[in-house]
Image (cartoon, rainbow, N blue to C red):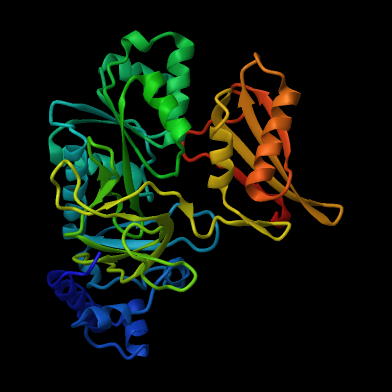
Amino acid sequence: MRISEKQLEQINTQVQRLIAADNFYGKKLKEAGITEVKTEEDFLKLPFSQKQDLRDAYPMGLMAVPEEEVVRIHSSSGTTGLPVIIPYTAKDVDDWGEMFKRCYEYAGITNKDRIQITPGYGLWTAGIGFQNGCEKLGAMAVPMGPGNTEKQLQMMMDLESTVICATSSYALLLAEEIEKRGIKHKIKLKKGVIGSERWGEKMRNRIKNELGIELYDIYGLTEIYGPGIGINCQYDTGMHIWDDYLYLEIIDPETGENVPDGEWGEIVISTLVKEGAPLIRYRTHDISRIIPGECQCGSRHPRIDVIAGRSDDMMKIKGVNVFPKQIEEVLASFPELSSEYQIHISHLDGRDTMRIYVETNGSVDFLEMAKRIAEKVKSKIGFTPLVKVVELGVLPRSEKKSKRVFDERYE
């Protein structure tokens, strides 16, 4: 996806603002000897930025406007190291709301909908982002936040919510609870807007079928506004990215070079009009690809594929590089298994071991099932894991994001 003349001009404006602000990123550009961006070649010489850079700028080193123009800060939900603090101007908040409103519109949601918002509020960008877009759309927001499932379901029934916004983990938990209570006939949900974590086809189908709703993948990250920078449309052929606000590249995570459209790589994002904390060539570590061609919906906004994982979630076990997605693909090939799984990696007696926990119903032989899974995983990644089959519902459900990989070698 080539950078347009207009996007180049916008990037150049951002570069000038950052240098003038002499903030963390402005200093980085000066050190690199960069003063302007006129051509695509100039753009590709711009240094990448990544999360560690943003942590190094803690607390307010990313601010590119006078403090009196900052109306809000948000922070990443990361659990390791210093948090990343992102300042927002009033225009940033407004732009984010417009992008989110567009997401709802692409999902066919209107001002007649009642939108139940279950992601968290506070420093995290999730809940408040969903609400901001909802109010811009003119729909009715039901700002529940996470947890208190009993109350969630009560409000869902009494207020006849038509849209659920959630992580895939919490959407699954709600679906299971609705089934358990036998209240599906009292639920009026039609659509689900799901984000914040990668989820496989099996999980998607369970949520869709158990709740009887259409599902829409929403994309975003705190460093780049928050959720709402892209969503799939009714044709479900990838997520449209709002390229009037952002320029998106796909790079080879090893070399840093751009890859051709259609090839998988790491998403890199530059903000075109962000004021509070503009970011240039920010490495997200999310793995996807640009889908070539035009969408049936007629939108001119480019599309990316589902997030297939992260370039930094690779596990090295017995000298083999393994991604959680590879294990997930194997597990998805067994119809007897639920969508839930956990991977535990430990170091015992001088060697690495991988244990995989999976769920199934009581109609299968657990030992025989474990053996079949272990054999299939070995054929995929080259070594045999220990597989433990448990009953449906034994693995924990989450109201936020589900943790699926536990690397106990570093704990």
Along the viewing direction, whichever of 82 and 30 lies nearer the viewer: 30
- Quarter of the picture containing the N terminus is bottom left
Residue 20: image quadrant is bottom left
Residue 85 rendering spot, x and y as whole percentages:
38, 62
Residue 218 rendering spot, x and y as whole percentages:
31, 43
Residue 106: image quadrant is top left
Along the viewing direction, whichever of 43 and 282 lies nearer the viewer: 43
- Quarter of the picture containing the C terminus is bottom right
Residue 43 rendering spot, x and y as whole percentages:
27, 78
Furthest residue in direction front, as rendered: 379
Give the tally of numbered discs: 0
Residue 68 falls left or right of residue 195: left
Residue at 23% x, 68% y: name it. 2
Residue 135 falls left or right of residue 42: left
Along the viewing direction, whichever of 399 and 49 lies nearer the viewer: 49
When the figure is inspected, residue 55 is found, relative to residue 187, above or below; the finding is: below
Furthest residue in direction right, as rendered: 349
Q: Is residue 394 visible?
A: no
Residue at 22% x, 54% y: name it. 302
Residue at 21% x, 74% y: name it. 11
Residue 267 rendering spot, x and y as whole percentages:
37, 60
Q: Is residue 336 visible?
A: yes
Residue at 33% x, 65% y: name it. 260
Residue 92: image quadrant is bottom left
